[in-house]
Amino acid sequence: MPLHAPLPDDKGRKRAFEWLLFAVALFFLLIAARLWYLQVIKAEHFDNLAQRNRTRYLPIAAPRGTIYDRHGEILVGNRPSFTVSVLRQDVTDKELLIQRIAEILECSVEEIQQNWAKFKYFPRYLPLPLKSGISRTQVEKLSENSIYLQGMIIETKPVRSYPCETAGAHIFGHVGLISAEELEQQRPEATSRAGDLVGKSGLEKHLNNTLRGIDGQLLVEVDVRGKLLRQRVKTPSVPGKNLTLTLDKDLQIRAQKELEGMAGAAVVLDTNSGEILAMVSSPAYNPDIFTNGISTDDWLELLNHPRNPLQNRALGGQYPPGSTFKPVTALLAAAYPEISKVDEVIDCEGKTKIGKRDFRCWKRTGHGPTNLKKAMRESCDVWFYTMSMRLGIDRIAAMARDLGMGQSYALPLDSERDGLIPDREWKRRRLNEPWYMGETAIAGIGQGYVLSTPMQLALMTATVANGGTLHKPHIVKNITTHTNSSEFESLPEVLHESAIPQGAMAQVKASLEAVVHDPRGTGRSCRIEGMRVAGKTGTSQVISLADDDEDLPEEEIIYRHRDHALFIAYAPADKPEIATAVIVEHGEHASKTAIPVTRALLLEYFDLEDPAQ
Amino acid sequence: MFDRRLVTNLDWAFVGLILLTAGIGIANLYSATSGWNPSGTPLYLKQGYWLGLGLLVMAGVSMVDYRHLLHLGPAAYLVCTGMLVAVFILGETNMGATRWLDFGLFNVQPSEIMKPVIVIMLAHYFSRHEHPDGHSISNLVVPGLILFVPVLLVMKQPDLGTAMLLLFIGATMALFSGIRPPTLAFLGSACIAIALGGWFLLHDYQRARIRTFLDPERDPLGSGYHIIQSKIAIGSGGFWGKGFMQGSQSQLSFLPERHTDFAFSVFAEEWGLVGALVLLSLYMLIVFRGVLVAHKAANNFGMYLAIGATSIIFWHAIVNLGMVMGLLPVVGVPLPLFSYGGTSMVTTMIAAGMILNVGMRRFMF
């Protein structure tokens, strides 16, 4: 065995071993240093990555705030909406499951299959929605059969409920999925995500940030294949803030009901605070059709309806106020007797000449000798022409504005319009024309350029009723959080205090009361036993008819050519609480349409029995 | 024939270190595979069987006096090289690489057997060719050939990891036997030149691995996934670790190959820096123990044999650890005693047996 004996512990060998041990130690030190780097220096970084690896955040939808009426009745609430979904990780037999679900839901297998395919790329830990908005009975059936439907789950999410149905649709508005443009608008501080529900119209839109809640987060632990392993609530959702409106639910529903079948609007205001007690526009729609996404057919029907149910006529409809404007002129005449010579008796011969033109009274035979009271009571145009000419358009315009007309009030609602109170300056600016004398007379009876929304008419009425104090109209009474702490409380806000002499005011108010309570009053059909009501009728011409057509029987004038019927009122006349304005498009005569609606509202508000029925 | 001194001289501390490390490895496998649906024997139990077999192999290897290996060396080398050639003709192809020979009862991976064989062969050569001033180029031609024939064969399989290990083991032995400084400088520059040239000889997947190693974020869901997830596992373990069976990366399957090549990542995630350093110390002690055996070896052959056997364990450990920590490309080298697998266990135990063999016969001449 020629084994070489080890070299004696010579220097070279010793150094070789030293080098060897040094190298070994160096390598292990390098590994240890790397460990230190990974596990101490970068530990937090890698810990975050590990967390992100295994956790996903799912939003928990927060219910929107409830909308209440002034008495705490629910106007817009939340109800659960049920969706059949599948957790794919638990599904054993896909085809059988689809078939059974389709059978219970009484829909086609293809529909379920299509939905399944549509959401195929949903992460596996997310339930895949198959069908939304299923009924309670279907939920019960599915739950009973759940052992045969392995993998199926029923998801519940809060959606809007509308106990008032159509009443107030224009005020409340509707919610829908946030659009790309709305998401874009929110930047850079986006608080919503795609798939969120946002207010699309009405209060839901304008007070979206108040009503919407803050979504919570569900922390979900998943494995490498996205299979859900555990979940826990990280942050609970915070429900939206509750809104209490100034509306009276019963009054609102009654108003909507009374206007059914007609196109028009009704507004009821509290005369002493500007609170909106009721505001309806007809025809209306039930916002519930938007809840699970409106169908194309429903949407087209709403959009193409000849009477445009989407429009809020109470705020956005601008009508010539016609004779309902006369209280403005009368008040002005009474306030400036030295200019208007209001105490003079004016002889109405059925027409008066201004310049070279004849201006006719609606009563061709004339009213005979007429004073303020008679003029108001019987709506004598000649008396108002005369007063208007004496006072001038600028005074009329100023008074109308003082009483609340010709401007909007920044209500948190859609398409509120300004109306129009014309004056010399306006005409020059707008039409670049001088003001003509005759236009003053026409404006004095609420025709011509004058336009008003039902809201402004009600406001003018309320201002007259309370003696000249213009309150800012408002609809939000208070806002509270879900824990019931107050966020906002509305107070009556006075916009203008008219300096109208007491006597003048009393004179006009007496004349308005006579409209209803005098046997010759145009508004006598509004009389209510045991209640003093003041009011004024109005008719606004839709088109000017040729002279010889005027005596056609009403039935023969086609609907869209018929005059609008208006009626404004406040009650009780001696101590006013509410003011109303009702307009019925193409309603012809107030007594036929606008007055019955007003009367019903007064009965409803004062909780009176209608002795006539 | 049996000498009682063999038992007294047996390095029980070394055996203890081996058993302790393997035991921790089995516990770690239990955690790493706890989420799996066992069909048949669970993996950690199988690893226990492999450990039992490994201990038998270790005992067997340590029994036969290593001096007999001196004569067996050339023959074993030739047979093993022949088997490497045979792999190309008869080998089983698995996942794009041909590494196995089917012997009916069991499969053999000649490249694994080559590890101890090359150690014997080089120990044989270096123990007979000592140069007090170190080897020159001409002295290194023969060991170079001995080394590079199998290295190239293994590389062609292709099995970059094993080829690299054979190279490292051979280089360690050559360096230990001494190389003249100018020769060393020349070889160093040659290596760099070959590395650059070798880039063009590499397979696409091998290049991809190296590219991904240099920048794992290039392909976070593809070839970079292993390294990224492994680093996340180790790093997120932090100082104290997440606790046994609590590693989210491991338990939720984000970490691939966690029972084999990335077993250490599981351990580092669950036991933190503290546990990882303890394990690191165990490997270092095993290596130091091997070097000590070499230092006290009765003769040159034994010394080289112990150095070579130790370097097998050392390089496996360093390459695997460097790999899972993102210091080296992912080349599929298991961590001795820790990664699941019979082949790795047997190779490691052969090396351990050789060390014990040399150690217990240090007083025999």
Image (spheres, coloured by chain):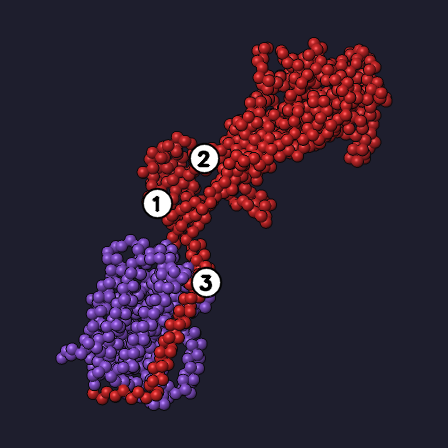
Chain colours: A red, B purple
Q: Quadrant of the N terminus of chain B?
A: bottom left
Q: Same chain, marks 3 and 1? A: yes
Instruction: Compare marks 3 and 2 and give the one earlier in the sequence.
Output: 3
Are the residues at dot 1 and dot 2 in contact (C-beta closer than 8 Å)? no
Snapshot quadrant of residue B111: bottom left
Q: Same chain, marks 3 and 2? A: yes
Q: How many labels does the image show?
A: 3
Identify which amino acid the numbered label 3 is placed on. Lys
Instruction: Compare marks 3 and 1 and give the one earlier in the sequence.
Output: 3
Q: Is residue B299 visible?
A: yes
Q: Nearer the viewer, residue A386 or A17?
A: A17
Identify which amino acid the numbered label 1 is placed on. Asp
Secondary structure category for the residue under label 1: helix
Residue farthest along the bottom direction in this orientation: B132
Snapshot quadrant of residue A613: top right
Q: How crowded is mark 3: few (under 14 residues within 10 Å), some or many (20 or more)?
A: some
Q: Mark 1 lies on which chain?
A: A
Vertical side of A412 occupied by A249: above or below: above
Secondary structure category for the residue under label 3: loop
Q: Residues within 10 Å of mark 2 (few under 14, many from 20)?
A: many
Snapshot quadrant of residue B70: bottom left
Q: Position of residue A116 (x, y in %)?
A: 41, 43
Image point (47%, 45%), residue name: A235
Q: Check disc 3 and report the residue beneath it.
A: A42
Q: Check disc 2 and report the residue beneath it.
A: A81
